[in-house]
Image: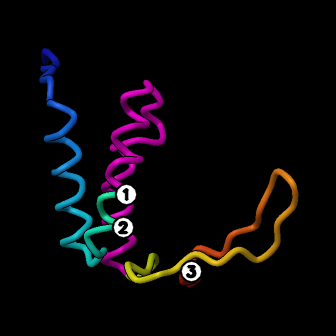
């Protein structure tokens, strides 16, 4: 079977990701930021951490493993590091 490739404009991909994340409960600002990170990562050629992660995020948001309303909190930090509690729900 031949593989098909389609070029999608970055703005369209970003809008798609934002819409998906908003439908999963993220507010517009957080959805826009997350979509920007996913698409930017892909545009840098780091596909392992880009848009291909979106289906997993959707599953976890819908299943309750991620909270759409979470507000990250810095637990500890140093000169070049930080431990951040992202508000994940543990099973």
Residue 33's tag is 1
Residue lying furthest top: 2
Circle nearer the N terminus (2, 3): 2
Location of residue 50 with respect to 46 vertically, above or below? below
Q: Which is more toward the observer, 70 or 59?
A: 70
Residue 10, quarter of the rendered image: top left
Q: CA distance from mark 3 to mark 1?
A: 17 Å
* Proximity of marks 1 and 2: CB atoms separated by less than 8 Å: yes
Please give the residue where the numbered disc 2 appears in the rendered image: 30
Q: Which residues are magenta?
A: 34-63
Considering the numbered disc 2 on the image, is that residue within a helix, a strand or a loop?
Answer: helix
- Above or below — where is 28 with respect to 4? below
Label 3 neighbourhood size at 10 Å, few (<14), some (14-19), many (20+)?
Answer: some
Give the x, y percent position of residue 41: 43, 36
The secondary structure making up most of the magenta span is: helix
Tag 3 secondary structure: loop
* Image quarter of the N terminus: top left
């Amino acid at each position: 079977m031949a593989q098909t490739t389609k070029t999608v404009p970055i703005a369209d991909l970003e809008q798609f990701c934002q819409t998906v994340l908003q439908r999963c409960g993220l507010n517009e600002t957080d959805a826009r930021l997350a979509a920007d990170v996913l698409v930017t990562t892909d545009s840098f050629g780091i596909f392992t951490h880009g848009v291909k992660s979106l289906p997993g995020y959707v599953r976890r948001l819908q299943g309750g493993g991620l909270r759409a309303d979470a507000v990250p909190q810095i637990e500890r930090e140093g000169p070049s590091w930080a431990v951040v509690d992202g508000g994940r729900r543990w099973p």
